[in-house]
Image (cartoon, rainbow, N blue to C red):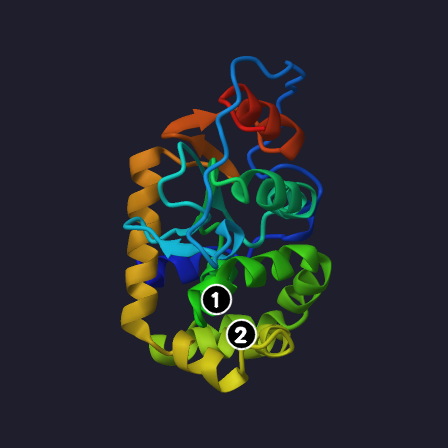
């Protein structure tokens, strides 16, 4: 999907996304852990796995031990309510219990449902790699306020679509309050503008997302993979038992 095509998509009604999984697949999972627990893996001296970030060849941001035996990947949209629910309920135990042990790594990859996702991704990826997941979580923790901004000035957003690419996403970020949102969280407005005006970077991001989604057949968010195998379900209470059955404790 090209940048022009993505921006031409309808500005979807965002509020319903807050109410349910974006792919509708929550899935119950009450099975108890089975099998032996994998032993913890110590981080290099003076470091912690929860502070270790690696950008993967797929353009994802991997938190934790790059050589962890259990690799959890989430395809997520920043405007997806179910992704927000996972961030609110699952991220802390995932990081503090499982990633910290060195046994599980967690990689977040982008999926775009609408043009706003491109803008938000451009901003979350604008600073240091260690800030990507914290900034993403800030969006999800404050999704209602973010949606208010996204829906507050539709005429200006539509007008942005007629601008050249190096102005388009900057104008969207200004019209929706996203520049101010990120500035309040440490990413200056000037830095945000520079990243969103980088047409080559934005186009490369969209192409990477398209390629990843096609390769892994991602059609909804969040979609999880554990060691390359698709995980059924979208909620932490479903994901955690599957990690435990694979040996995470």
Percent position of residue 213, x then y: 35, 41
Name the mark on residue 248: none
CA–CA distance in space, label 2 to label 1:
7 Å
Percent position of residue 133, x then y: 53, 57
Q: Residue at x 49, y 58 (%)?
A: 117
Percent position of residue 237, x then y: 67, 29
Label whose residue precedes the other's in the sequence (2 or 1): 1
Q: Which residue is more in the foreground, 185 or 248?
A: 248
Q: Residue at x 36, y 30 (%)?
A: 228
Query: Residues at badges 2 and 1 in contact (C-beta under 8 Å)?
Result: yes
Percent position of residue 248, x then y: 53, 28
Element under label 2? helix
Q: Residue at x 34, y 53 (%)?
A: 59
Quarter of the C terminus within the rendering: top right
| Residue 241 appears anywhere in the view | yes
Crowding at mark 1 (Cα within 10 Å: few <14, some 14-19, many 20+):
many
The residue identified by callout 2 is 173
Against 148, residue 66 (above or below) is above
Q: Which residue is more in the foreground, 197 or 34?
A: 34
Element under label 1? helix
Name the mark on residue 119: 1
Against 170, residue 243 (above or below) is above
* Residue 29, quarter of picture: top right
Against 151, residue 248 (above or below) is above
* Residue 163, quarter of picture: bottom left
Q: Residue at x 45, y 61 (%)?
A: 118
């Amino acid at each position: 999907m090209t940048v022009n095509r993505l921006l031409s998509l309808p500005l979807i009604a965002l509020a319903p996304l807050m109410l349910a999984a974006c792919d509708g697949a929550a899935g119950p999972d009450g099975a108890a852990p089975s099998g032996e627990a994998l032993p913890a893996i110590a981080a290099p001296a003076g470091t912690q796995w929860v502070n270790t970030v690696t950008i993967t060849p797929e353009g994802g941001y991997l938190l934790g031990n790059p050589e962890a035996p259990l690799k959890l990947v989430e395809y997520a949209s920043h405007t997806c309510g179910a992704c927000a629910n996972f961030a609110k309920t699952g991220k802390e135990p995932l990081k503090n219990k499982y990633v910290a042990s060195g046994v599980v790594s967690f990689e977040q990859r982008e999926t775009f449902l609408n043009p706003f996702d491109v803008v938000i991704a451009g901003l979350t990826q604008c600073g240091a790699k260690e800030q990507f997941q914290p900034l993403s979580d800030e969006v999800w923790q404050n999704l209602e306020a973010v949606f208010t901004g996204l829906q507050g000035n539709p005429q200006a957003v539509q007008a942005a679509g007629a601008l050249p690419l190096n102005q388009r996403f900057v104008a969207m970020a200004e019209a929706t309050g996203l520049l101010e949102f990120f500035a309040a969280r440490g990413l200056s407005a000037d830095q945000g503008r520079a990243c969103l005006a980088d047409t080559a970077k934005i186009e490369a991001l969209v192409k990477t997302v398209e390629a990843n989604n096609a390769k892994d057949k991602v059609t909804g968010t969040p979609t999880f993979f554990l060691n390359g195998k698709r995980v059924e379900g979208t909620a932490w209470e479903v994901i955690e038992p599957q990690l435990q059955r694979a040996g995470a404790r």
